[in-house]
Amino acid sequence: MTSDPTRFDFEIPARPEYLSLVRSLVVEAAESDTALSRERVEDFKVAVSEATTNAIEAHARACRDESIRIRCTVTDDRLEFHVTDRGFGFYPDQIQILPEPDDPSRLNFERGLGIYLMRILSDKVEIQSGPDGTEVYLAIDLSANSSNS
């Protein structure tokens, strides 16, 4: 009874000017066969953009010219994005714990909200990282219950 998933695989150069292309793909994929609210689509666009930005920065730190791989899959019940880079990798469980975004002391930290945003704006986040790169999996549920953020 489940239809075949729609899947897009593509690569982008590891440069910030390609973020708008990724954001457009999120919107197109979310609006193609789903009834997600505009707010939910915008939230997920931010989450995928954060993952892509991290991948671009990982390539810059590693001096890599390789492309970043992105896979988008739309199933009957889920919209998924995989963002894969070939940077040095990191250990997600060893990320510095920063003050909450609304804590005034947070102003002392210029960066560090990317993974936090991915986690609060997606229904599922998985990060696999090692010395040869990182893959970030982000998904939102397409059921009627998830159309509100």
Image (cartoon, helix red, strand yellow):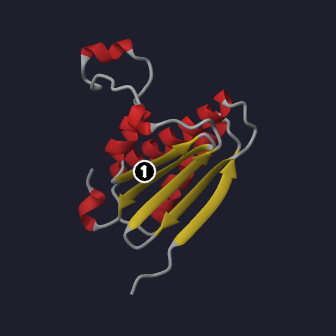
Tell me which residue sits at (41%, 49%) in the image: 44
Q: Residue furthest right?
A: 65
Q: Toward the viewer: 99 or 90?
A: 90
Q: Quadrant of residue 53?
A: top right
Label 1 residue SS: strand
Residue 38, relative to residue 106: is it above or below? Answer: below
Q: Residues within 10 Å of mark 1 (few under 14, many from 20)?
A: some
In the image, taking residue 19 as reference, residue 122 lies left or right, namely left
In the image, taking residue 88 as reference, residue 104 lies left or right, namely left
Q: Toward the viewer: 125 or 34?
A: 125
In the image, taking residue 84 as reference, residue 121 lies left or right, namely left
Quadrant containing the N terminus in the rendered view: bottom left
Position of residue 16 measured from the top left corner of the image (x, y, whole percent): 63, 34
Q: Residue furthest bottom?
A: 1
Position of residue 149 measured from the top left corner of the image (x, y, whole percent): 27, 50
Position of residue 6 measured from the top left corner of the image (x, y, whole percent): 53, 71
Tell me which residue sits at (33%, 26%) in the image: 97
Amino acid carrying mark 1 in the image: Glu
Position of residue 84 measured from the top left corner of the image (x, y, whole percent): 59, 49
Q: Toward the viewer: 101 or 42?
A: 101
Q: Toward the viewer: 3 or 132?
A: 132
Residue holding disc 1: 126
Q: How many marks?
A: 1
Tell me which residue sits at (68%, 39%) in the image: 14
